[in-house]
Image (cartoon, helix red, strand yellow):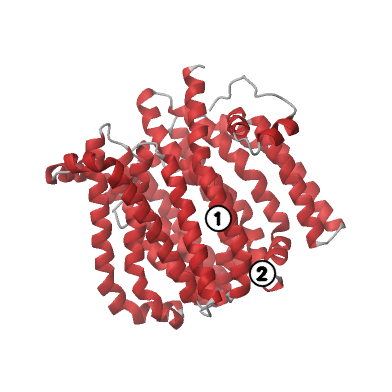
């Protein structure tokens, strides 16, 4: 096997290792969400979204983005110092939020128009620490290519969250507190597992390598991360939370609940594939830049993101409402409409999110800051205009439209900076659109002729199965991994009616 194909094969293997854990986690989520939707009111999901917006915004910058630098050093000793630095910073930030939330609570609750959130704000500081520490451990584990460990952590988090949230409702506590407690405890469980496993297997390296001088040297060497990436990430995170904040301010927590659950299901493809690809991509990209193979790697990753993301998002733009009505009941039909409005935008975000890691690889953090200023400004303007007119659907439609333009432009620009011609990227998009768009248009026509939720869902399922087989045929490395699985290998072989192809696939 050639060196190029070997690297492509290991990339696919590592990404699929992460994806298999995500598949279980998301499959469990898809089973549990309809139950939760019948046990909890939309307002409870709205409060969960607001709590997550507050804690998540702080958690993602609690390490001052030094966790991103863990992947970059050539030696594990330097990376170990950065790991300890990141975890220490997340602990300090978590502690610092205690007085901020205590004294700022009246203002926060008044601005969000959500006084019901008051009893749960005390859970934010531990959530912030767990979130920051998990991010640091996530990059440490990825550096060592221990992707099986990450996959299990995701499964553990999903199982714990589902168990706590369902158990709380069945015990008679079907309030926002049950949903929030499940989220906090699951974060703690996943972080504790990764931390324990890292200490058990790499504890000696950490003890021997970590010094005060090493920590200070790492802070100085990678100072661009707190100077630029922290602000860029803060803007990006706040812009992500803007819908929850502003929909609550302009409308109600019920509308926030519809939005939160709608986007939660839209994110399934990202969690299944995009996050796994991005995790492996960052580790490989740091190596590829040194080896001079970054353009080839970026092209292959973009091709896979388009291959995995375009079809499901376009299908959801057609059957979103029908899917929500069947799975969660008529009360959640509006959430399905929101998912339809946001589906195409979600595809552009799906492709842009992993590729945005190139800002760190290329050490262009200042450019990332500029892009995130644009994202924040356009999102804020879109939501304010929709809120001004008192129309939540208009707010989300403008949000989606501006996001498509910004994320699309960002992806083309950063990949071009990595050495990939725009013509090649547009060619990949058009080639996949030539396959997916006619199929989705046929689905839309079928739904119009036969306006039945179950008929729409059945047709979409058949099309998705056909597209899944197309992906297996298009990407030999994904197919190879599927064929190695004894449970599905026979089905795939019969469906494709072909042995494992030997021709290479240029990642």
In this view, the mark in front (2 or 1): 2
Q: Residues within 10 Å of mark 2 (few under 14, many from 20)?
A: some
- Residue with the most extreme left position: 213
Q: Are marks 2 and 1 in contact (CB under 8 Å)?
A: no
Q: Position of residue 386 (x, y in %)?
A: 57, 69
Looking at the image, which is closer to me, 218 or 388?
218
Label 2 vs 1, first from the N-terminus: 2
Residue 206: x, y in percent? 22, 42
Image position of 256 with respect to 352: above or below: below
Residue 391: x percent and y percent?
61, 72
Q: Residue at x 35, y 82 (%)?
A: 106
Left or right: residue 53 versus residue 102 is right
Q: Which mark is residue 402?
A: 1
Q: Residue at x 36, y 71 (%)?
A: 123
Q: Is residue 214 visible?
A: yes
Q: According to the image, label 2 marks what residue? A: 334
Q: Is 346 situated above or below 249?
A: above
In the rendered structure, the answer to whether residue 236 lies left or right of residue 446 reads left
* Residue 288 position within the rendered picture, expressed as x and y whole percent measured from the top left: 40, 28
Q: Say which residue appears at 34% left-offset and 74% top-offset.
A: 122
Q: Does any portion of residue 351 appear in the rendered image?
A: no
Toward which corner of the image does residue 273 lie, by quadrant?
A: top right
- Where residue 43 sits, quadrant-wise, is bottom right
Q: From the viewer's side, name the closer residue of 283 and 441.
A: 283
């Amino acid at each position: 096997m050639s060196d190029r194909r070997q690297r492509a094969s290991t990339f696919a293997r590592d990404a699929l290792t992460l994806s298999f854990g995500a598949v279980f986690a998301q499959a469990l989520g898809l089973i549990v969400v309809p139950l939760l939707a019948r046990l909890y009111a939309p307002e409870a999901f709205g409060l969960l979204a607001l709590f997550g917006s507050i804690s998540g915004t702080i958690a993602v910058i609690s390490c001052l983005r030094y966790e991103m630098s863990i992947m970059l050093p050539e030696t594990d000793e330097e990376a170990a110092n950065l790991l300890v630095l990141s975890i220490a910073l997340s602990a300090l930030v978590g502690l610092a939020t205690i007085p901020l939330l205590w004294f700022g609570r009246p203002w926060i609750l008044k601005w969000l128009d959500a006084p019901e959130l008051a009893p749960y704000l005390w859970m934010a500081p531990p959530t912030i620490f767990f979130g920051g520490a998990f991010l640091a451990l996530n990059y440490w584990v990825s550096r060592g290519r221990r992707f099986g460990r990450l996959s299990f952590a995701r499964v553990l988090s999903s199982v714990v969250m589902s168990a706590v949230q369902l158990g709380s409702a069945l015990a008679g506590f079907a309030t926002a507190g049950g949903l929030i407690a499940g989220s906090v405890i699951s974060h703690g469980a996943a972080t504790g597992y990764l931390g324990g496993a890292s200490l058990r297997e790499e504890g000696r390296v950490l003890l021997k390598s970590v010094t005060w001088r090493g920590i200070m040297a790492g802070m100085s060497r990678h100072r661009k991360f707190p100077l630029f990436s922290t602000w860029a990430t803060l803007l990006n995170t706040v812009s992500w939370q803007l819908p929850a904040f502003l929909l609550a301010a302009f409308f109600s927590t019920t509308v926030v609940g519809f939005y939160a659950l709608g986007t939660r299901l839209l994110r399934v493809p990202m969690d299944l594939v995009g996050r796994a690809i991005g995790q492996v991509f960052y580790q490989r990209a740091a190596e590829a830049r040194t080896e001079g193979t970054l353009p080839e790697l970026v092209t292959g990753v973009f091709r896979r993101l388009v291959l995995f993301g375009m079809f499901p998002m376009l299908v959801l733009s057609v059957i979103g409402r029908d899917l929500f009505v069947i799975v969660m009941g008529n009360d959640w039909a509006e959430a399905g409409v929101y998912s339809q409005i946001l589906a195409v935008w979600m595809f552009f975000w799906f492709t842009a999110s992993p590729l945005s890691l190139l800002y760190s690889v290329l050490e262009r953090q200042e450019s990332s800051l500029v892009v995130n200023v644009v994202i924040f400004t356009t999102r804020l303007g879109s939501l304010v205009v929709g809120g001004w007119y008192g129309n939540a659907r208009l707010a989300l439609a403008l949000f989606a439209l501006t996001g498509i333009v910004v994320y699309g432009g960002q992806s083309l620009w950063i990949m071009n900076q990595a050495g990939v011609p725009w013509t090649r990227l547009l060619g990949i998009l058009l080639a996949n659109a030539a396959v997916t768009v006619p199929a989705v248009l046929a689905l839309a026509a079928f739904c119009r002729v036969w306006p039945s939720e179950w008929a729409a869902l059945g047709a979409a399922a058949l099309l998705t199965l056909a597209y899944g087989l197309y992906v297996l045929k298009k990407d030999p490395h994904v197919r190879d991994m599927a064929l190695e699985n004894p449970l599905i290998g026979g089905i795939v072989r019969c469906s494709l009616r072909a042995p494992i192809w030997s021709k290479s696939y240029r990642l």
